[in-house]
Amino acid sequence: MIKLKNWKRLIAVSKFTLTRGYSYCSTALIGVIGATSIKPYLDQYIELRLWVLILLAVAGFMFIGLLDRVFNILGEEQSYLTERNKTMMEGLYKK
């Protein structure tokens, strides 16, 4: 349980929770937005149902996420964030 007097922690946990929820929802919704945006242009050449375009968009996101894992981009980001976090660095390299 987070105490209200620890307001920085409360903000950090709330931000993290909101970001995680946003990432799950935005994956599906960005597929809908993208699919509805390009559907009128694609209908001239090929007729695809909207749900097929949404699935293609989500599959594209998964593919990019897979490339992110293969090339360990997340690990590099976390290393960078650790280096930028003074408190973490002091804890790691305490003398």
Image (spheres, helix red, strand yellow):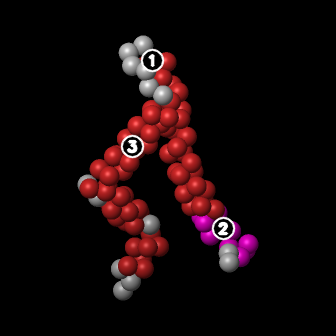
Circle 3 packing at 10 Å, graded few (<14), some (14-19), many (20+), is few
**N-terminal label among 1 and 3:** 1
| Residue at 42% over, 77% down | 90
Question: On the picture, is 17 further left or further right than 55?
Answer: right
User: Predominant secondary structure in magenta?
Assistant: helix
Which residue lies most toward the left here? 71
Question: On the picture, is 22 further left or further right than 48?
Answer: right
**N-terminal label among 2 and 3:** 2
Q: Which of 84 and 95 is in front in this view?
A: 84
Mark 2 or 3: the one toward you: 3
Q: Nearer the viewer, residue 69 or 95?
A: 69
Residue at mark 1 to residue at mark 2: CA–CA distance: 48 Å
Whether residue 74 is visible to the viewer of this picture, yes or no, is yes
Whether residue 34 is visible to the viewer of this picture, yes or no, is no
| Image quadrant in which you'd find residue 18 | bottom right
Magenta-drawn segment: 3-13
Q: Which SS class for mark 1? A: loop
Q: Which of 2 and 28 is in front in this view?
A: 28
Task: Determine which residue is flagged by label 2.
Answer: 10
**Residue 39 horizontal/vertical position (percent):** 48, 23
| Residue at 48% over, 28% down | 49
Task: Determine which residue is flagged by label 1.
Answer: 43
Above or below residue 9? Residue 63 is above
**N-terminal label among 1 and 2:** 2
Residue at mark 1 to residue at mark 3: CA–CA distance: 21 Å
**Which of the labelled discs sits on residue 19, or is there none?**
none
Q: What's the amino acid at mark 1?
A: Asp
Judge whether residue 41 is colored magenta. no
Task: Determine which residue is flagged by label 3.
Answer: 59
Q: Which SS class for mark 2? A: helix
Q: What's the amino acid at mark 3?
A: Ala
